[in-house]
Amino acid sequence: MLSFRLATPQQPSWDDYFAHRAETTRDGRLARFYGEGSLHPDTPIGEAPLVALDLETTGLDARRHDIVSVGIVPFTLDRIALPKRRYWVVRPRRPLEAASVAFHRITHDEIADAPRFEAILETLLEQLAGRLVVVHFRHIERPFLNAAVHEAVGEEFKFPMIDTMSIEAQRYRQTAWARLRRWLGRPSVSIRLHNSRARYGLPGYQGHHALVDALATAELFQAQVARHYSPQAPVSTFWR
């Protein structure tokens, strides 16, 4: 059984985890991904290579629903590498439902000839390797990626993520002022991607497109660090 030390009560040692997986995984694609290693926890966030990731899915339960599109945008705190962006539509294992089509606007015709997730896995891993992944709500991206990789190769897929929604929750949902607002019966501040961006003066984008939302997440994280943190803050301040 895998055992690796904890850096804090909540924080696993990603160095140990990556090293163990690189040695023990049976899949060459995963071995190469984990072989790139994890950033040292003390790496300044301003020096970290980052990549924003967004998934569109057929629902919210990774046990019953599937990924239908993936968008990634590499970036740093200084710039966004739009020429290196990638976007894939993938064919889910189950038929699309009308509600999911209305939500992400990916139609039956678009997925008819789309590849299965496994067909893009190697390229996706190459794009993520060596970078710190940034998402808006890791409780979607993490379980769906794990489920998709497990379906493809029969192994767990886990790595550190920065969650811009979690940063907004800490700032606007978990403070004494936020608790007082709830006690007074006032609505909680929205931490959805669009509303979060608006607090930083960022423009509104058309949501629920994996590539657009990945770009929106990259810009939001840049704004969050600029307002609340120093570029010298270690990556361990952010990742989960």
Image (spheres, helix red, strand yellow):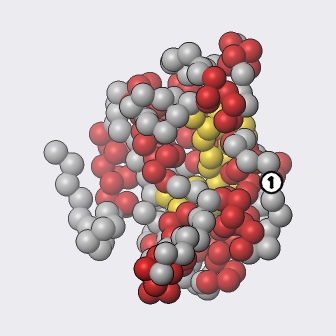
Which residue is identified by label 1?
Answer: 205
Residue at 66% over, 59% down: 193
Residue at 37% over, 61% down: 15
Amino acid type, residue under disc 1 in the picture: Tyr
Q: Is residue 215 above or below residue 232?
A: above
Q: Position of residue 213 (x, y in %)?
A: 70, 50
Q: Quadrant of the C terminus?
A: bottom left
Q: Is residue 111 above or below residue 170?
A: above
Q: Pick out the residue farthest to the left.
A: 1
Q: Position of residue 209 (x, y in %)?
A: 72, 41
In this rendering, position of residue 109 left or right of residue 175: right
Q: Position of residue 29 (x, y in %)?
A: 48, 34
Q: Is residue 99 above or below residue 225?
A: above
Q: Residue 13 appears in which quarter of the rendering?
A: bottom left
In this rendering, position of residue 6 left or right of residue 227: left
Which class describes the residues within 10 Å of circle 1: few (<14), some (14-19), or many (20+)? some
Q: Position of residue 238 (x, y in %)?
A: 50, 71
The local secondary structure at tag 1 comes to: loop
Q: Is residue 48 above or below residue 89?
A: below
Q: Residue 108 appears in which quarter of the rendering?
A: top right
